[in-house]
Image (cartoon, helix red, strand yellow):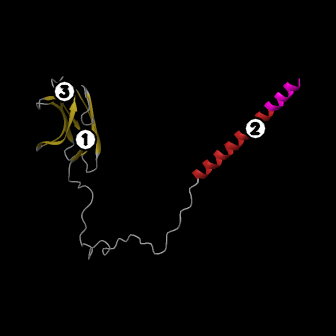
Amino acid sequence: MKVNLSLLVGAVVLIIFIGVSAFTISKIVKRQAQEAAEPSPQPSPIEGFPTASPSPDTLGQTSIPDIQPESGISTDTIRIFITNPNPLTLISSPVKITGYTNLTSGVIAARVKDEQGQILGQSVTDTCTSSQSCSFEINMSFAKPQDKTGTVQILSLSDSGEQLLESLAVRF
């Protein structure tokens, strides 16, 4: 019975020791996590430290130019940006072509061509006539190509004829 009692006391002491150790380790880990989360204070700038100056003298210029270059895009420029499909994307019929454009005619055509330039499909749609970009969407079916690659083209249609705006390579 004495052996069992001393064994029981030893087990209780061991359990208490493990509990206290685990509690101490968790407090240390919490403290380290808090210290890591709080940024350390940064020293203030040293007096007399050089600062950037936008003056012409520091740039090696003797005077500021009278005329500044223009910035931005001219609204006279017709632009188109195809968002779908992406270049070299695998497409199948029917294909959905989407993007943004600013046109003066308001009519665009989409074409799918094979490697030899043969038109496999074409579709026409109206779009806005504004200097601001607007979105377009064209759903088009096209003939089964013999080649593995081709192009998707977007053209502006107006009274003066067709104007190729954008062309991108695709896979079939």
- Marks 2 and 3, how far apart at CA: 73 Å
Mark 3 residue type:
Lys
Mark 1 residue type:
Thr
Residue depicted at 52% across the width and 68% down the height: 44
Q: Which of 167 and 77 is in front in this view?
A: 167
Residue 138, x across and y down, in percent: 25, 33
Q: Earlier in the sequence, mark 2 or mark 3?
A: 2
Q: Is residue 171 in the magenta section? A: no
Q: Callout 1: few (<14), some (14-19), or many (20+) C-alpha neighbours within 10 Å?
A: some
Give left or right: position of 86 versus 146. Answer: right
User: What residue did someone put label 1 on?
Assistant: 127
User: What residue did someone put label 2 on?
Assistant: 17
Q: Callout 2: few (<14), some (14-19), or many (20+) C-alpha neighbours within 10 Å?
A: few
Q: Is residue 6 in the magenta section? A: yes
Which residue of the protein is positioned furthest toward the right in this rendering? 1
**Quadrant of the frame with the C terminus:** top left
**Marker disc for residue 148:** 3
Count of marks, rendered view: 3
Q: Earlier in the sequence, mark 2 or mark 1?
A: 2
Magenta residue span: 1-11
Mark 2 residue type:
Phe
Q: What element carries label 2?
A: helix
Q: Main secondary structure of the magenta part?
A: helix
